[in-house]
Amino acid sequence: MSVPGNRWDLLAPHTGPPPSVGVVVCHYRQPAQLARTVAALQAQTRPPVSVVVADDGSPEPPDPAAPAGPVPVRVVTQDDRGFRAAAARNRGAAQVEGDVLVFLDADTVPGPGFVAALTARIAAWPDVLAVGRRRHADLSGAAPGDDPAAAPQLPDPAWLADGYRRTRDLLDASGTDWQLVISAVLALHRSLFDDLGGFDERYVGYGGEDWDLAYRAWNNGALLVHEPAAVAWHDGPDWGGRPEAHDAVGGGKDGERIRIAALVPDPGVRGAPLPGAVPDVLASVDADTHGWELVEIVDAVLNQTHRDVRVRLPGGDPRLDELYRGVADTGPWSRDRLRRARARLHVHAPLPPDALARAMALLTGHDLGRVEIAGADGRTLAALVSTRAAGRARRGRVDDAVAQHREGVATLLAGMP
């Protein structure tokens, strides 16, 4: 079965036994809030097989036995070296049992049907990244086991509600709607989590690691799904609306934006093409191309109007290494680059300066798997392959890297309007 675009509505209901579910609860110095969340997990209509509290260096690690219940709960902890939720969640995921991973924050109490609702579509299609509905309430007066829906309610984040309404619960998601995914109420299959490399531990300080994971999921062909029936109650208002959300160097929303711009090459979050370690397009040249012919091809790539591109040379010529030192690579692409770049460009001949920009607009605008760039004589100059297509092919969701996204192959005539 191949699912075009983000059409999670085409998934058939799961039949047979559901996969096992493990829950990772991220925690730091919140014993009372954690007790409410653990009690709610013990009372789920579909109980998880395991709960791991991923403690981010609390001075006194929490007691895993409080409150007690039928679901085994254990604590894993790490040194307190600042806000490292990404590392804590990865540590918890490595220790928790279950084929499906659910991530919660310690201050977010799930309703009784949360786990069942959040994981239903993942059971039908392991390439789903599901996000639940985070609501807000003042839970300070609630005891473990109390119904969080009965506590005084607070406003829900308008930006999330508006985004889910606009995208019909992410059914109509586009290339920037991964920003509607939050890790406080998140679930995905362990196989997808491992394929993506988990949370990126370069995110230190509040925020960004959830959007980063969601970007890589989208960019590698996963389906993003909002499950409004999977309700969990956050204790207190939305963090992004608080005054300290825009604090100074090293944290807050400003720090979050800077980290994301460095690691997510989507032009929607970058104000300019960056010469950094994470390019938008990875370009490689035929291995049998040498000498001045190779120079002409590489120069044509570097002169593209779509400038967020990195070139890999065939290697073996020290003169070219000297010529392109600092602006081209000779070694293989890293896994990190392959998961993050939106496309790979395979170049056979020099390209007109606007060819890559036009091909990227066609590839991403129509959610294609591959765009062939041809010259006026019909000769193929280059091929641009979507990372979304390659991701689905890598995980066996389609027959090959281009047979997806609306049967996605198109030809662009370079130099033609």
Image: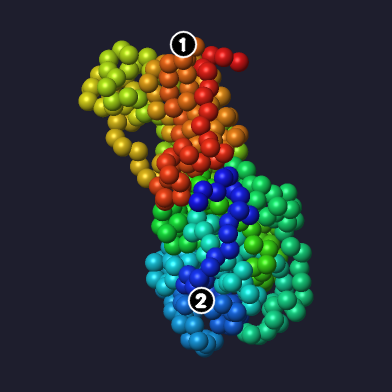
Type of residue at label 1?
A: Asp
Residue 147 vs residue 79, the one in the foreground: 147
The amino acid at mark 2 is Pro
Q: Percent position (x, y) of residue 112? A: 64, 78
Q: Residue at the location (46% across, 77% down)? A: 50
Drawn side of residue 365 relative to residue 263, left or right? right
Disc 1 crowd rating (10 Å Cα; few below 14, some 14-19, many 20+) is few
x 46%, y 46%: residue:
398
Disc 2 secondary structure class = loop
Secondary structure beneath label 1: loop
From the viewer's side, name the closer residue of 34 and 22: 22
Q: Which residue is mark 2?
A: 48
Image spot of residue 243 (x, y percent): 70, 57
Name the disc covering residue 377, or none: 1
Quarter of the view holding residue 266: top right
Q: Which of the labelled discs sits on residue 298, or is there none?
A: none
The picture places residue 211, in percent across and down from the top left corner, at 56, 52
Asked if the residue at tag 1 contacts the one at tag 2, i.e. Cβ–Cβ closer than 8 Å, the answer is no
At horizontal 46% and vertical 15% (from top left) the residue drawn is 378
Colouring method of the image: rainbow
